[in-house]
Amino acid sequence: MNLPGLTEITAQVQAWDAAEFWFWSLAALGFSALSFIKAFKGLHKSRLLEDTPTSLIRSASQGYVEFEGTGRRLDGEPVIAPLTGTACTWWSFTIEERKTYTVNKTRHSRWQTINSGSSEALFELEDSSGRCIVDPDGADVFPSATQSWRGSSAWPEKKGGGVFGRYRYTERRMHAGDPLLVVGYLTTHRAAQTANIAEEVRLVLADWKSRQTMLVRLYDQDNDGVLDLKEWEIARREAEALVRREHVQEFRHPGIAVIGAPPDDRSFLMAAKNQAQVIKHYRRGAVLGLSLFFLLLAVGVTLISMRLG
């Protein structure tokens, strides 16, 4: 088969109508820009992983951290993946429909997403020093299992196995016992951090007032059977001291450590892989993105020069 030469290709491009020419030229330049952005993000994420040391849960400081350990499910209702019914720690799914469309009298088809979702259920990460809660909302996830199959309905009638049909179902999961790398923002929550001391003092005093005999016995210094303003202030200060002592005891106990999305634009990552594998993935994507950037940029510029040059 003889491939067309540069002269023939130039003639074909010049024969396109204006709409077709600008569609393909701008598409090439647009996808070139997207490829560059993807490459930049991949390089940024790989560098961020390299610069973030792995910490132990028990000794980690509050803020942006990296943990490596094992995924565990929390007690209570199990997390069930919706398409396959599989018990897991995290899931996401996508349902796509094959759509057809026409461009310049040429018929094309593509997959269009019609339904999707991901788990927001909390689960645990365990390492050699302890455990913390993982809040997966907003994470960039590298799952341990991915299933994809096809069928004839907008919701799968069976749990995998089909190879034909206008609908495509994809489910991604992580399971209890999977190795787990998490990079995100660590916050330790304690009850006393959000307590309203004034409100608690008020409740204590209200309880004491309901036991008037006890209150008078403890704080009636002049033995007249009632509390004056000075005696009531002593009782109030004692109630406040009691509340603060209880809060000190709460702070002596470990809080609930939760790792989740950072409050800034830094990456939040969950991966059923080790750090080296994830860095390799991001770098490979960056190389591919840069390659596509230069290729598509060259295509776009060449089309414009053939038409306008």
Image: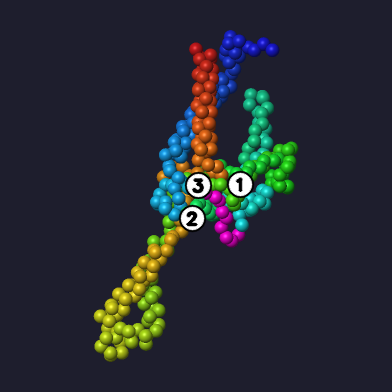
At x 59% / y 52%, what residue is drawn? 176
Q: Are marks 1 and 3 in contact (CB under 8 Å)?
A: no
The residue segment tinted magenta is 68-77
- Residue 214 position within the rendered picture, expressed as x and y whole percent measured from the top left: 37, 85
**Mark 1 or 3, nearer chain start:** 3
* Residue 130 tag number: 2
Q: Disc 1 vs disc 3: which is toward the camera? A: 3
| Residue 267: % across, % down | 46, 42
Image-quadrant location for residue 6: top right
Which one is in front, 42 or 58? 58
* Location of mark 1 (residue): 173
Are the residues tagged 2 and 1 within 8 Å (C-beta)? Answer: no
Find the residue positioned furthest to the front.
Answer: 128
Q: Is residue 235 left or right of residue 98?
A: left
Residue 116, percent from left and from top: 61, 45
Q: Is residue 281 above or below residue 271?
A: above
The residue beneath circle 3 is 68
The residue mark sitting in front, 2 or 1, is 2
